[in-house]
């Protein structure tokens, strides 16, 4: 249900698919797969909790209330923080491989 109703969850799923494909192509290690899986779970879980909090807040406070807005903002912030750290994990794992691939292609084409 969250995947159908939440655009951000669909975006997270696209990134999961991209990371899995990249992980297979770059033959990342078991430890790196575990870190990717941990990041997937953290971001997905945070997004689901954010959706649950927003739904409950909308139920109990249909009109705007400052505290309701604060609760929603904090929950969204938790998703943002988890997504940023997941992105950092991905960069640490994949940037060196991408640079190495780029150097190999460059060397092949110009040497």
Image (cartoon, rainbow, N blue to C red):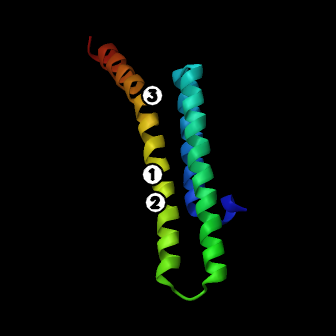
Callout 1 secondary element: helix
* Residue sitting farthest toward the left: 110
Residue 5: quarter of image: bottom right
Callout 2 secondary element: helix
Check the image and report above or below for 54 versus 98: below
The residue wearing badge 3 is: 93
User: Tag on residue 77?
Assistant: 2
Q: Nearer the viewer, mark 3 or mark 1?
A: 1
Report the Cα–Cα distance between label 3 and label 1: 19 Å
Camera-side residue of 42 and 108? 42
Left or right: where does residue 109 sit relative to residue 90? left
- Residues at marks 3 and 1 touching, judged by CB atoms closer than 8 Å: no
Looking at the rendered image, the quarter that the C terminus falls into is top left
Left or right: where does residue 88 sit relative to residue 11? left
The residue wearing badge 1 is: 81
Q: Nearer the viewer, mark 3 or mark 2?
A: 2
User: Tag on residue 46?
Assistant: none
Camera-side residue of 56 and 23? 56
Callout 3 secondary element: helix
- Residues at marks 2 and 1 touching, judged by CB atoms closer than 8 Å: yes
Picture coordinates of residue 77 (x, y %)? 46, 60
Picture coordinates of residue 94 (x, y %)? 44, 29
Report the Cα–Cα distance between label 3 and label 2: 24 Å
Residue at 26% across, 16% down: 110
Q: Residues within 10 Å of mark 1 (few under 14, many from 20)?
A: few
């Amino acid at each position: 249900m969250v995947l159908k109703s939440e655009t951000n969850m669909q975006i997270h799923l696209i990134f999961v698919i991209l990371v899995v494909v990249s992980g297979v192509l770059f033959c990342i290690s078991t430890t790196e797969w575990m870190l990717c899986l941990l990041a997937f779970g953290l971001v997905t879980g945070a997004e689901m909790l954010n959706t649950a909090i927003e739904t409950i807040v909308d139920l109990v406070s249909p009109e705007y209330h400052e505290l309701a807005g604060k609760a929603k903002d904090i929950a969204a912030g938790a998703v943002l923080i988890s997504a940023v750290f997941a992105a950092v994990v991905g960069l640490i794992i994949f940037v060196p491989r991408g640079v190495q691939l780029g150097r190999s292609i460059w060397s092949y084409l110009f040497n």
